[in-house]
Image: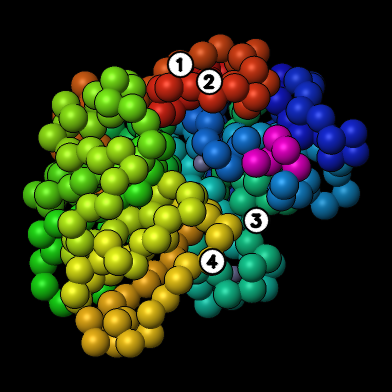
Amino acid sequence: MRAVSLDFEHRLVVENEVPPPPAPASGQALLRIVETGLCATDRELARFRFGEPPPGESTLILGHEALAQVVEVNGGGLQPGEWVVPMIRRPCPSFCPSCAARRRDLCRTGLYLERGINRSHGYFTEFAVDPIEDLVAIPADLLDVAILIEPLSVVEKAIDTAFRAQPLPPRTAIVAGAGPVGILTALALLVRGIGTTVISLEPEDHPRVQLLRKAGVNYLRGQNPQPADLVFEASGGDLELLPWVASQGVLVLIGAAEHDLVVQPLRMLIDNLTIAGIVNAGPAHFEMAVRDLSAIPRPLLQAMIERRSFSDLRRSLRESSSTPKLVHRI
Ligand SMILES: [Zn+2]
Ligand SMILES: [Zn+2]
């Protein structure tokens, strides 16, 4: 079957033939991959900034955000024909307490596998086999936007973390960044009735800004905002974020910024501030994502997605797009 893979030996992205997966063992399902989403992680992988092929192999099939249809099931819990989104991480070899409790997002050894990223093949190919417990069933009426569930699951973990750290229900939020994660964060906050401002660098007539305005989100182009109860960093940029956090507030880091964060210990203490970092998501966050996806106005979600063909992937990895989420049909 055809695939798009990273060739670690020659440091190239290649379209290659790979063997089909084995028949599903007990507790596994065979999936037909329908589409995969592209994100900043894939672009970094294509630059060989991180990522690792499976042990003993020199190539890694790309694609960690996938929508698939169940072809065959060996065990209970799913039926052939059902639609699923796979969770990305698989447990570490020592099955640490977090991995054993299905919270691979909180793995304590760091030796977890990640499909399409670390030591496990991804979904940019025709078929895959996965444990049934790592698949999230999707209602058929969400299919046109279901590819957003994986990035939204990370957003849900960020919002869940922020809400747990805040003693009172938050009223206002700031999201730094208007990429897919920033926009999804703003939309998920609006569903919760939180007044949300997005700060980014796109000009007013940019499609992403128009989408945010249509949703009812405030937009500031590179200006300093009024402080808010919650601040989400989804830009990966070099921003002074703590002054934006109101007293008793929470700063959640989702974007992988590489600069240092300036912290004023006295202000953090007096204002009871919390800083949290999050990555990946647990099963409950995927369920929250499915719920929120139904609640967010569908045209806004549809406007986030641009679909391309299988052979467009290598071009998509090189060029950016004004549409937040590029999706490739398999
Ligand atoms: Zn991703
Ligand atoms: Zn683990």
Answer whether residue 317 is visible to the viewer in this image.
Answer: yes
Identify the amino acid type marked 4.
Asp
Q: Residues within 10 Å of mark 2 (few under 14, many from 20)?
A: many
x and y, in percent, of residue 61 in the image? 71, 34
Q: Earlier in the sequence, mark 4 or mark 3?
A: 3
Dots 2, 1 in contact, CB < 8 A: yes
Q: Nearer the viewer, residue 28 or 58?
A: 58
Tag nearer the camera, 3 or 1: 1
Q: Secondary structure at mark 4?
A: loop
Q: Give the label on residue 307, or none.
A: 1
Identify the amino acid type marked 2.
His
Tag nearer the camera, 1 or 4: 4
Furthest residue to the front?
223
Q: Distance from label 3 to label 2 (Cα)?
A: 23 Å
User: Label 3: which residue?
Assistant: 113
The residue under the point 51% across, 14% down is 308
Q: Is the residue indicated by label 2 positioned so its CB lies within 8 Å of ligand 1?
A: no
Q: Main secondary structure of the magenta part?
A: helix
The magenta stretch spans residue 45: yes
Q: Secondary structure at mark 2?
A: strand
User: Label 4: which residue?
Assistant: 260
Q: Nearer the viewer, residue 166 or 224?
A: 224
From the viewer's perspective, is residue 108 above or below residue 285? below
Tag nearer the camera, 3 or 2: 2
Identify the amino acid type marked 1.
Arg
In this image, 89 relative to 267: left or right? right
The residue under the point 16% across, 26% down is 214
Dots 3, 1 in contact, CB < 8 A: no
Q: Secondary structure at mark 1?
A: strand
Q: Distance from label 2 to label 4 (Cα)?
A: 35 Å
In this image, 118 relative to 84: left or right? right
